Amino acid sequence: MESEEHQKGKEKFKEGKYEEAIELFKKCHKKEQRAPFYSNISACYMKLKDIPKAIKYARKSIEETPEFEKGYYRLINAGENTREYNSSVMIAEIKLGRERKEEKYWKEYYSGNEEVEVKRINLEYGKGVFSKKRYQKEEIIMKEIPIIQISKIEDYYNCCGFCLKTLCSKEPKNKYNQIFKEINKEEIIKCKCGMKYCNFKCQQLDYTHSLLCNKLKGLINYCNINHISHPLCIAKIFATILISQNIEKSLFPFVVFHSSPLIPFNSEIVPFFLNIFGSLLLKFNIYGGWTFIYQILYSVLKYNSSSILPLNPIQSLLLNNNSLLIDNTLLSSSLINHPDITAFTIEAEGLFKYLNTLNHSCSPNCFLANTDDSFALSLIASCPISHGDELTISYIDNTLPYSQRQSLLYDSYHFYCHCPKCNLMI
Ligand SMILES: [Zn+2]
Ligand SMILES: [Zn+2]
Ligand SMILES: [Zn+2]
């Protein structure tokens, strides 16, 4: 049942008496805290062309009731013509499952790269990455460091907390252990919480650690039991966002990625996040609450991140010297992929601004690889590339037969492939 004031408010709105309608809706909200009142007030301010207030009340309605979809529509309508509200509008669009038609949200963010250009292909394919130069086969097109990165949970204490370089000899022990220790002992810094860094510089660069140090134990345990590292990665992302002076701006690099369909929220992690961030999490309320943002970030990581396998210290030494003598053992570069040596490699994953915007093809013209001992990934041409070509990589093992490729792509990434190789099959 609508109250008398609510009905009166709606009448005033129809009559164009927006100020009076606002007062009535505010009264309604005092009596009964329901999102539609704030949403109605937002609509009134839109009519009055008071955009900041229209945005303010749209956000209040989302904050109060994240499930109330109309609040997101109000926010999109109010925020659409302002430059400052990109990420909240994008988050609203994700919530509503709406195709992101507005290039203005990301065009500027992706501008200014010398090697590649990010453009929209069409509504079905979304964005794509295009070459600005010519490249020969096996040439490195660009090298990128991740926006966020984390090792597999099993390797969490075996590598640098920032650049993921192997720092500890991992089990099983083999005959290269001694060599590993010899080349890997200098400069390592250990935090009181157990986290290790290559050196002082890496420790400084991991600036979110100050917010997380000694608070992660419960979450690490949870991740260990479940063999997952995404919750830890999201804790790191949350720290990045909460430490920054501008939540909007620091959320944007993450929400710009593809994230639908949203993966259901797992409430088991709630106590861990409350324990780490406490009331800081309230800062996410105007974006629909921290659990909603968590859900988006989880989906973004699942659909977009790349695996990172930094060369371990023995491999990078072998690369720089064709052969070397350590501890009376002669090592040659032909050993670089020997299982006893690759056993020292850290498995990790990260999110890359450009590299994770590359589209898939089953006959790609590029591939990704780690070419040094850091977390930087290189984009390498697998055939000659011309200026203006779209750059593609394969998200899966592209030697699989057609039907397996299609079902794998659909199960993991929710699309069917229409690349030239697949179109030949139809
Ligand atoms: Zn490091
Ligand atoms: Zn620490
Ligand atoms: Zn294909």
Image (spheres, rainbow, N blue to C red):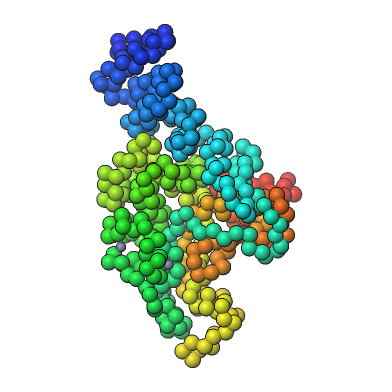
Residue at (55%, 61%) from the top-left corner?
A: 377
Which quarter of the figure has residue 43? top left
Is 339 on the left or on the right of 68, as rendered? right
- x then y, percent, for residue 253: 48, 47
In this orientation, which residue lies closer to the viewer: 203 or 230?
203
Residue at (34%, 21%) from the top-left corner?
A: 37
Residue at (30%, 59%) from the top-left corner?
A: 213
Residue 241 showing in the rendered view: yes
Q: In which quarter of the image is the N terminus?
A: top left
In this orientation, which residue lies closer to the viewer: 16 or 411?
16
Would you place residue 117 above or below residue 379 in this image?
above
- x then y, percent, for residue 303: 51, 49
- x then y, percent, for residue 115: 63, 54
Would you place residue 213 above or below residue 177 in this image?
above
In this orientation, which residue lies closer to the viewer: 412 or 79?
79
- Residue at the outermost bottom position: 328
- x then y, percent, for residue 175: 46, 84
- Residue at the outermost right position: 424
- Residue at the outermost left position: 31
Which quarter of the figure has residue 321? bottom right
Residue 266 showing in the rendered view: no
Which quarter of the figure has residue 198? bottom left
Is 223 on the left or on the right of 274, as rendered? right
Residue at (45%, 36%) from the top-left corner?
A: 84
Q: In which quarter of the image is the C terminus?
A: top right
